[in-house]
Image (cartoon, helix red, strand yellow):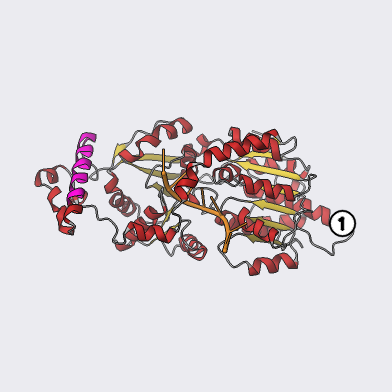
Amino acid sequence: MPTQLPFDQIGLSPDILRALKEQGYLHPTPIQAQAIPVVLQGRDVMGAAQTGTGKTAGFSLPIIQLLLAHANASASPARHPVRALILTPTRELADQVADNVKAYSRYTPLRSVVIFGGVDIGPQTQMLRAGVEIVIATPGRLLDHVQQKTLNLSQTQILVLDEADRMLDMGFLPDLQRIVNLLPTQRQSLLFSATFSPEIKKLAATFLKNPVTIEVARSNATAERVTQIVYKVNEDAKQAAVAHLLRGRNLKQVLVFSNTKIGASRLARQLEQQGIKASAIHGDKSQAERIAALEAFKNGAIDVLVATDVAARGLDIAELPCVINYDLPYNAEDYVHRIGRTGRAGASGDAISLYSDKDARFLADIEKLIKQKLSPVQLDGFVPKTIQDEERIGNDRRVAGDRRNDRRAPGGSSGYGTSARKEKVDPWFLKPYEPDQAPETARNSETGKTSSAAVSASKPQKKAALLGGLVKR
DNA sequence: AAAAAAC
């Protein structure tokens, strides 16, 4: 175990130390101990770190220090060009990183601003005009400001790509390329990613110069603190299973992940109807709603936050005791990120996943990634006794559903809860699945994303092509 | 397959 010097012995200015002390931080986490000296040396960094490892402080503390040192040596402090740019994939993450940067730089003259879409651009423009040294941003709105000439990146010496793998997944590569082209070639670049995939390595080869690789706490370290349970549940029974699980844990501070925006909204609504204080957070919510939901969850106004993978990574919600996967995620990596929302900073946590036949195809990938078997077990009193039963009931249900549709009458579903079946499983399980009252088409028009399927279908190819182009250049 | 991100 390497000796880790406290913060006040690793070359940070008293102004930074004061802010750290105020927040009760005395000793760096492993990633901070590794990253801070390297960043202070001016080296490029390729970092692999999970959420909750203190990664944000790992790059923002030395950046603040570097900017302070440079400002002191500078002959003309009259103008205030943007000197450090931190890019994140989601608005919430940008907001949080900005909160941290503000806290750490509180007693310094450095100013920072967070830039992302979905909110009024006016205040951002005003802040940029007044002058800021550090910008924390999502790519789209940042480029918007560049186009409007309210932001000049020609003197930006430090670039951070946070959650770079996520940014690639989200198709940000062209935007990243555009942004990097606006920066001086002489600069320091830091790239953080959950994994070092071939794509990430190519990105690093393009954007970084002779980087120092920093890697801490692989995913199995997370798994050690997190108790993972997978419950076998019929797809239609998931909502009731979540309600049951929530009641079993006193409803407090539970983050529930859904694979879809519609699913997240629906589940939150159903839970609320049952008197459970819940809100949904996803990309079709307005930014104000997203902020409100996150805030309500953090301050305890709601007990349950139902989220899409917008919240899978990076969100800093302290000490979550429990995370529930309503669905298994499409990407195995997202599973690691989701369960990483619990059991943080040494605390233990539970990660509960609901597993239906729909989720079956994702399980193997997840088990392979975490190098651990996740044998699905029954959720007592909530699932049929055998898989065969589950499949049969699933089939019966589909038949019943068709019949109901044919009749176009809500009472038509009563036929499938036969008394024979009722003896085998709990009555609630046979309660007919009630589709949402609002028609799907209405909700789709609400999202306004009718063409998204076609776009995403071609995305992997596009991504590969772009990366190929990058490497050749 | 889905989600995320600029107007």
**Chief SS of the magenta region:** helix
Does the stretch in magenta take in A425?
Answer: no
In the displayed structure, A467 sits above or below A79; it is: above
Measuring from the top left, give residue A446's x and y in whole percent: 42, 61
At 34% across and 53% down in the image, what residue appears?
Answer: A246
Question: Relative to A317, is A132 on the left or the right?
Answer: right
At 78% across and 44% down in the image, what residue appears?
Answer: A185
Q: Between A410 and A464, which is closer to the camera in this rendering?
A: A464
> Pointer 1 indicates a residue of which chain?
A
Does the stretch in magenta take in A391?
Answer: yes
**What is the magenta range?**
A385-403
Measuring from the top left, give residue A97's x and y in whole percent: 62, 54
Q: Is residue A311 visible?
A: no
Among the 4 quarters of the image, the one containing residue A439: bottom left
Among the 4 quarters of the image, the one containing residue A384: top left
Measuring from the top left, give residue A114's x and y in whole percent: 64, 60
